[in-house]
Amino acid sequence: MRHASDALLTGIGTVLADDPLLTDRSGLARRKRLLRVVLDSKLRLSPKARIVETTDNDLLVFTSAKLNSQRARKLLDAGVELMPVGTMGKHINLKSVLVELGRREITGVLLEAGPTLNGAALAASIVHKLFLFYAPKIAGDNRVPFAIAPNLKMPALQNVRTHQFGPDIGIEAYLRDVYKK
């Protein structure tokens, strides 16, 4: 899925928890270089994070923090592109993020994030397709595999398909037809 996307989007919570690289490990030729995108409203990204240490003009961080801080200068010196963006409440404005990515001719964004950003993306109605992975083991505090906030009106899932990956199961579904208005 990373290989089929132009950008991989995650939140700072995922970076702080997992210290991921967020790379396309397929080894296949790409249409364009994968852009790694992090939403970090308070600019908590460490210059020592693996995603920063491996940047090669492919890391974009959206933030509402001041860009003249010492932390910002260290990230800029490390080759991170910082993009100021407004907020909606206490969260980064996701529609503004997508507008900027569209301006950069990013046509497919893969969201790999935790519950906060995933919920915000669903609430902002910017998700067109879901791909949910389930392992045959329940872990973590929240034992509900896929829960929606009570005030969030989810459309019916369309074109639902299942995939098996060893013992894991993937459920693929669309929330809306992207070609209909």
Image (cartoon, rainbow, N blue to C red):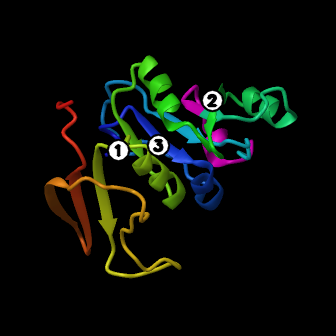
Q: Secondary structure at mark 2?
A: loop
Near-viewer residue (56 or 124): 124
153 versus 147 height, above or below:
above
- Left or right: where 33 falls relative to 78: left
Which quadrant does the C terminus fall into? Answer: top left
Q: Label 2: how many residues lie within 10 Å, few (<14), some (14-19) or many (20+)?
A: some
Q: Which residue is mark 2?
A: 85
Residue under numbered circle 1: 127
Numbered label attached to residue 137: none
Q: Residue at horizontal 44%, vertical 51%?
A: 112
**Disc 3 residue crowd, few under 14, some 14–19, many 20+, Cα 10 Å:** some
Pick the front one: 172 or 155: 155
Spatial separation of the CA atoms under disc 3 and disc 1: 21 Å
Q: How far across and how far down the image is residue 6, in percent? A: 38, 31
Magenta-colored stretch includes residue 51: yes
Quarter-wise, where is residue 85 in the image? top right
Gap between marks 3 and 2 measured at Cα = 24 Å
Reading the image, the residue beneath label 3 is 23
Residue stretch in magenta: 46-60
Sequence-first disc among 3 and 1:
3
User: For the point 61% across and 43% down, which residue is it?
Assistant: 51
